[in-house]
Amino acid sequence: MSRRPSALLRTVSGGAAVLTALASATGCGSESGTSGTSSPSGEVTAAFVACHGSGQLLGAGSTAQANAMDVWKAAFSSGCPSITVTYGGGGSGAGIQQFNQGKVAFAGSDAALKQSEIDASKQVCTGGQGIDLPMVGGLISVVYNIDGVDHLVLNGQTIAKIFNSEITKWNDPAITALNPGVALPDADIQSVHRSDDSGTTANLTGYLAVASNGTWPYPASKTWAGKGGQSANGSAGVAAQVKQVKNSIGYVELSFAQTNGLKSAAIATGASKPVDATAANAATTIAKAQPAGTGNDLALNLNYATQDEGAYPLVLVTYEIVCDKGNKAATLDALKSFLAYTSSDSAQQAIGSQGYVPLPSAITSQVKNVIPTLS
């Protein structure tokens, strides 16, 4: 197998990327010890990451991380031209299915593997199983399109009732009570949910299950169970639908809210004031995530019921799902090199400008320790 070491440098300034391939670095799938830094002009410069392997590296799954993947693929291909990374969306459920069928080297999922999915992965991970590596931090924006309403506050109960067709008017007393002085229209609410099995849906319904005081009657699930509403495929589909339809509401990863110019509701959590949907507020919640996996599986428990000041509760962590053992030899080096880049400080900073939440170093350091052990 070809082993042409190279390195990559990524610069992000004002949302524009300048990609430059640099000199060689040593150590497969590891950083040279130089972390990303910020220049006086605000540019973020990537760390040097070794590049090994060649050919095509296939991934699929979460659409919430699709915009992050676009940033990463461009940077990585510039530094590692011998490797072509292809990532297809389709949702977390479809990505896990393709992974467990041996069609992709890694899957993106906004929800950790269930035991049944781990069991199925053993058919393709010879001598091992699928594991969860947290890679993309984010938040779920409850996006809305109401003329004249620039700031909207909702809570777990109102969100649950809206998406289950129990609150059907924007001027419903439950909503107006949360928004004193806001002129909410006497208009029908058009809710939009995901049509595909989605980790974003799993995180939203996980939040509703604990934050709606029993109003949401369904368990957390990748498959939508709420009554009524319209459906759309992927985060891009939901964002496009909300953007086009007046008096609509949906849920997407913050990156899609930003790229589509959509407004995001603040969430009343029980803290002293409602919490805005910002990366900084989401980072407060993600930083307190607790381990849920064992061994090299780094699944996390997120506290959707947080009432901490400035802690946005509707957060998600997207995992890259890989085999701990039994990865295909033809793509193993490329996979480890790509994951080493995406978990680097600089790669995490690069997606911060795209509406994502750079993962805390306490999490990425664990990921970096696991990557060299993949076999």
Image (cartoon, rainbow, N blue to C red):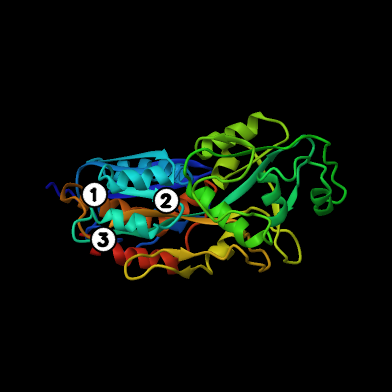
Specify the label residue 356 is tagged with: none
**Disc 3 to disc 1, C-alpha distance:** 15 Å
Residue at the location (75% across, 45% down)?
Answer: 167
In x, y percent, where is residue 308? 66, 69
Q: Quarter-wise, where is residue 291 in the image?
A: bottom left
- Under mark 3, the amino acid is Asp
- Under mark 2, the amino acid is Ser
Residue at the location (86% across, 51% down)?
Answer: 180
Give the structural element (helix, strand or loop) at label 1. Answer: helix
The disc, 1 or 2, on the residue closer to the chain's N-terminal end is: 2
According to the picture, the residue beneath numbered tag 2 turns out to be 109
The disc, 3 or 2, on the residue closer to the chain's N-terminal end is: 2
One can see residue 356 in this view: no
For the residue carrying disc 1, how many other residues have a C-alpha within 10 Å: few (<14), some (14-19), or many (20+)? many
One can see residue 316 in this view: yes
According to the picture, the residue beneath numbered tag 1 turns out to be 334
- Under mark 1, the amino acid is Ala
Give the structural element (helix, strand or loop) at label 2. Answer: strand
In x, y percent, where is residue 160? 67, 51
Q: Quarter-wise, where is residue 77 in the image?
A: top left
User: Along the horizontal axis of the image, is 123 left or right of 214?
Assistant: left
In x, y percent, where is residue 370? 30, 65
**Disc 1 to disc 2, C-alpha distance:** 20 Å
User: Along the horizontal axis of the image, is 32 left or right of 177?
Assistant: left
According to the picture, the residue beneath numbered tag 3 turns out to be 324
